[in-house]
Amino acid sequence: MRFSWPLTACVLLNPGLASATPEFSALGALLDLISSVLEKSSPATSLTPTNPSTYWYESISHNGISPVAPNGTTWPVFRDVKATYGAWGDGEHDDTEALQNAINAGNSYANRSSNSLGTTGQPAVVYLPKGEYLVESPIQFFVGMILMGDPTDPPTIKASANFSGDYMIYAKDPSQDSTTNFFVGMKNVVIDSQAFDKDKNLTLVDWSVSQACQLANVRFDMPYDSTGHVGIDMPQGGSALIMEDLYFHGGRTGLILNNQQYHLKGLTFDGCTTGILVQHLFMGHCQACSFSLCGIGVDTSSPTSGVESLGTFILTDAIADNTGALVNTAATNGSFGSLVLENVRVDEATVSSTVTADGEVVLKGSVAQDHAWVRGNSYSPSGPGSGVLRVPGTMYQTKRSASLVDDAGSFHRFAPPTYAGYDVSQFVNVKDVADHPVAGDGKADDTAGLQAIIDRYAGDKIVFFPYGIYLVTDTLKFPPGSRVFGEAWAAISATGDRFINAGEPIPMIKVGEPGDVGVAQFSDLLFTVEDVLPGCTLLEVNMAGTHPGDVGFWNTHFRVGGAADSQTQKKCGAGVTTDPGDCKAAFMMAHFTDSSSSYVDNMWGEHPLPFPSVNVANMECLTDKQPAWTADHDLDGSGNNATNPQYVSVGRGVLIESTKPSWFVGLGSEHNTLYEVNIHDASNVFIGFQQSETPYWQGTNSTQLAPAPWAPLALPSDPDFSWCAGDEAQCRMSLYQTITKSTNLSLYAGGFWTFFNANEACEDACQDDAVRIDGDASTGVYYFGIGVNNVRNMVVRAGEALVEAVDNEGGWKANVAAYLANIGS
Ligand SMILES: *[C@@H]1O[C@H](CO)[C@@H](O)[C@H](O)[C@H]1NC(C)=O
Ligand SMILES: *[C@@H]1O[C@H](CO)[C@@H](O)[C@H](O)[C@H]1NC(C)=O
Ligand SMILES: *[C@@H]1O[C@H](CO)[C@@H](O)[C@H](O)[C@H]1NC(C)=O
Ligand SMILES: *[C@@H]1O[C@H](CO)[C@@H](O)[C@H](O)[C@H]1NC(C)=O
Ligand SMILES: *[C@@H]1O[C@H](CO)[C@@H](O)[C@H](O)[C@H]1NC(C)=O
Ligand SMILES: *[C@@H]1O[C@H](CO)[C@@H](O)[C@H](O)[C@H]1NC(C)=O
Ligand SMILES: *[C@@H]1O[C@H](CO)[C@@H](O)[C@H](O)[C@H]1NC(C)=O
Ligand SMILES: *[C@@H]1O[C@H](CO)[C@@H](O)[C@H](O)[C@H]1NC(C)=O
């Protein structure tokens, strides 16, 4: 959005001057942007910013609990490192121990460092008031926590000159594999290594984590001309979704990527020798990234496991100034290491070498807003049906719906709200409203209390949910004027008979009635189910905003099963049943209806599925996973063994029927039965990234072949799998995307990964179809970056396998840079 780029407005001619002007432009711009969004919100609201000097979250009452932990009412969710844990924050005393104590603290039953409470039992917000926190040795994070600074004056974590260690912060919980490190967050802080020898190796953050994590609004301050400092790396990999609004200053490398996939939004690299070093990545999208005074912006030329492991890397709405080459890649062709550049502006200093491949310049100059430069495999308008076209670098004309973009033609984007402009008196804590008691304890029915509070304060106050599990037995309706902020993914969880009829599904969270226009914003929440509820749609959005971003979801996830707070964990676990038909745990994750217009940023929805070779031993004491997810394992298995298999079946993932503009920036949808994402009768939709997996229990030898166990089908949008023979198990698997009767779609970066058949490891041909799109009924579809693992047909168009994996080897298994066969005339 109006992050008026160039972010670093100055085009510096002398790199030496840059260090003299280290203003925190990213944060400042974020705050401006947030208040401008709010100021332009619903005219009905009386909520106007008052710009207090103390952050509301610091002074609001802190009464969050951990409902699933023994003695959980004494569990400290909020941890103020200064007020409670003795940090000085003066830049002189060593605060390492105080910070670590604040992270580790628990109650009489357990500390967080022991991991005996799983992922969901040990919620923590480690809060840093303004100040400078000196550290002399590394800080270790654990799952289920957010490290959060005061956004009104972001605190600094500063390495001492004699810092001892290779990393300042290890964000990865050592008791979990990187791919199951869920629910870790860090925001509103500055990490500063400038006092440390610039030529010694030091990495500021090890971010080897996965979905349902949040890294947002962080500045990495490193020395210029450093040969040793790195902002972020991920040596142990991970399966992540998004990082956003980060500012890297100086250093040898800003960001080293070693992950399955990533959406990078609003990253600024200022004076880094290399901005982004891609070591290993099957699919990546860098949206609105800017590079200033960097030797190389993005380097994909020397992946650690060979160029074959690189899929497509996409740059949209990017800017480069005084940078050697925006992208440096290897001299490959075909689908390995594919590149897409769309709406990329470079200055005079960068113009002669926008993309270099093995030392040769393959692209000079800028790429216009309505063009995409593609290097890789492309299915272009001239060739539908005629097979793959390998392009070493070709310019295509593109078109974005005017409704999706700002004045500069870039896709709108909105930072996660902090509400830093509002005083604590402009908030209401749902557990502090005397005449409407709310427990959040995972036991009491909070429906009536929450509904009364939501209705009373709509338009007047921001509604704060301290960490807890808020059970609801009926639909919770959010009217225009709703702003909701959760603490460490506070959970709203459905239960009861109202949600059990798959023939008459109802939403748990309903945002507006059809036709409503106004504000409804949700941050840091988890939507889940407490029981097996075949008639529950977790989220239904009907509302549109007056402005883009008025209706939005940030860092808000779905989880169905796989956690200690839900009976699904027992009812759908191995030892009780191995039939997903017994565990139709939810009807649908999310439905964006035709009257809605929403901005979705960092949303993961899945339900736990059985991991193959699972441990059934630890069924009792567990927590949940939180992103939009149908459980594929038990998040709360004790110790290192969070692998209790889960035979959960959620009917549908995300149904998009919106016709007003909608943005999905970092969307994960996993393990749902009929489809992961269904774009049906929709128009003006942007997807920046979609990461998905099918249910592990589907495929050959599965007892349930789609649409089972959800037949008879309930919705006209449901795929019926009539194109498959009755016993074709690999055909009857969840579609990663189905697109019907839809127009004006800007789709980027699909990462569609299949691993199992009937819970047994499977290789190569494990699923027939990834994307199914109709023929000429869907037009204006611009699709860049489709990657698959173990799927035969990447795109089936009008019933014909147009894009096949066998023609597009590269990335995890197969990969295409551009699909332009449905752009229409
Ligand atoms: C819970 O707290 C009570 C009272 O402090 C204590 O006696 C008991 O041992 C605690 N239980 C656990 C499991 O920590
Ligand atoms: C938690 O850690 C503190 C400090 O190390 C220790 O004194 C306490 O016994 C630990 N508590 C539990 C329940 O392990
Ligand atoms: C760093 O230096 C301070 C002051 O001399 C000293 O107290 C501290 O122990 C040193 N820390 C390390 C990690 O060497
Ligand atoms: C510093 O890191 C670089 C890049 O990984 C490596 O080549 C070098 O050996 C490291 N130096 C030391 C002293 O570890
Ligand atoms: C590109 O790839 C094709 C197919 O693998 C190969 O035949 C051709 O030599 C390659 N061209 C270049 C310039 O590397
Ligand atoms: C598609 O986008 C174009 C260009 O912005 C616009 O004129 C047209 O109305 C859009 N179509 C629909 C169905 O919204
Ligand atoms: C995990 O579970 C498996 C299967 O039950 C068991 O063999 C293994 O010892 C367990 N590992 C740990 C660390 O408890
Ligand atoms: C299906 O089950 C049979 C019998 O157990 C087994 O031999 C076969 O490998 C399985 N097929 C797959 C794809 O898992």
Image: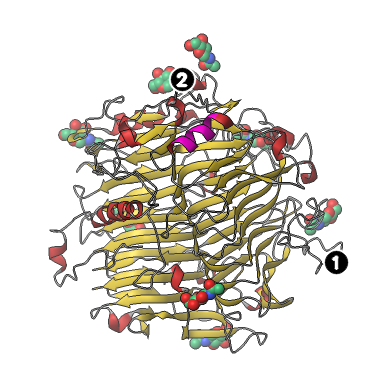
Q: Is residue 641 visible?
A: no
- In front of the other: 259 or 816: 816
Task: Indicate the amino acid at tag 1.
Answer: Ala
Residue 680 versus residue 707 in the image, above or below: below
Of the numbered discs in the image, which one, if any, rests on residue 725? 1
- Residue 748 at x, y percent in the picture: 51, 68
Magenta residue span: 449-456
The residue singled out by tag 2 in the image is: 74
- Residue 398 at x, y percent in the picture: 48, 80
Residue 192 versus residue 361 in the image, above or below: above
- In front of the other: 354 or 553: 553
Left or right: where does residue 390 sit relative to residue 601? right
Q: Is residue 108 visible?
A: yes
Task: Indicate the amino acid at tag 2.
Answer: Thr
- Residue 418 at x, y percent in the picture: 35, 45
Left or right: where does residue 418 sit relative to residue 152? right
- In front of the other: 298 or 62: 62
Q: Residue furthest bottom?
A: 382
- Residue 740: image quadrant is bottom right
- Please tell me which residue is depicted at 38% across the width and 53% down the height of the picture: 41
Classify 10 Å Cα crowding around label 2: few (below 14), some (14-19), many (20 and above).
some
Residue 408 versus residue 667 in the image, above or below: below
The answer to whether mark 2 and mark 1 are in CB contact below 8 A is no
Left or right: where does residue 215 sit relative to residue 120? left
